Amino acid sequence: MNAPARNKTTPRSARRQARQVALQGLYQWLLSGEDAGAIDAHLRDQSNYAGCDQKHLDTLLHGCIREAAALDALLTEHVDRPTKELSPVEHGALMIGAFELQQCLDVPYRVVINEAVELAKGFGGTDGHKYVNGVLDRLAAQLRRTELEADRKR
């Protein structure tokens, strides 16, 4: 799985790049079940690793793998089929989104959803981003209710 082409005039943020690298690692993990340490070592050899927020990458990759069963259980409430039947790209983007909604409270829910949608657009199938958006909208309503209500009052 390679990074999508991008407009050269739009710099990619270090966190966005961390999410992309984390998605690549989760994709590998979902397909192979390989050890997280081996996947991490492989990712460090990739050219796009150097420009990413390495702390956020570590948090996402290792957190999503460590919490995979809990994240899938959370996602199961909002998806229309077993998570194992989702495409690995959409599954990985949903795992990252769910993890950030649950664990990275410093990242606004709208940013979490937008970033996961952008991952699905860049790496996934034609309409996968719409699915990711719908699932994470419902999950945000569950996990970030107070933030959503405050947003609506503005």
Image (tube, rainbow, N blue to C red):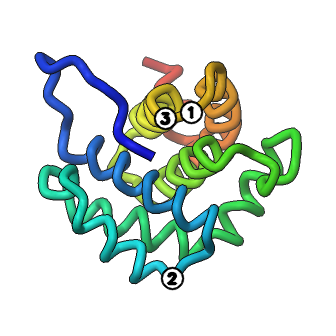
Quarter of the picture containing the C terminus is top left
Distance between the Cα atoms at labels 3 and 2?
23 Å
Q: Is residue 125 above or below residue 63?
A: above
Residue under pointer 1: 124
Question: Is 96 drawn above or below residue 114 in the view shown?
Answer: below
Task: Check disc 2 and report its element: helix, strand or loop.
Answer: loop
Which element carries disc 3, helix, strand or loop?
helix
**Residue sitting at 69 percent across and 69 percent down?**
70
Judging by the rendered image, the residue that carries numbered circle 2 is: 35
List x then y, in percent, for residue 22. Answer: 40, 57
Q: Residues within 10 Å of mark 2 (few under 14, many from 20)?
A: few
Q: Nearer the viewer, residue 28 or 82?
A: 28
In the structure shown, which secondary structural element does the residue marked by tag 1 occupy?
loop
Residue 123, numbered circle:
3
> Could you give the CA–CA distance between mark 3 and mark 1, rounded to whole angstroms?
4 Å
Tag 3 near tag 1, CB within 8 Å? yes
Q: Residue furthest right?
A: 81
Q: Please tell me which residue lies in front, 16 or 127.
A: 127
* Crowd band around label 3 with a 10 angstrom C-alpha radius: few (<14), some (14–19), many (20+): many
Tell me which numbered mark, 2 or 1, is placed earlier along the sequence.
2
Residue 105 shows in the view: yes
Q: Residues within 10 Å of mark 1 (few under 14, many from 20)?
A: some
| Rendering coords of residue 114 (x, y %) | 45, 29
Instruction: Name the residue rendered at 64%, 49% in the picture.
Output: 88
Kindly identify the residue that appears in the image at 24 percent across and 68 percent down: 44
Q: Position of residue 8 (x, y in %)?
A: 14, 20
Q: Is residue 150 visible?
A: no
Q: Position of residue 15 (x, y in %)?
A: 25, 47
Amino acid type for the residue under numbered disc 2: Asp
Q: Front-most of 2 and 57? A: 2
- The amino acid at mark 1 is Gly
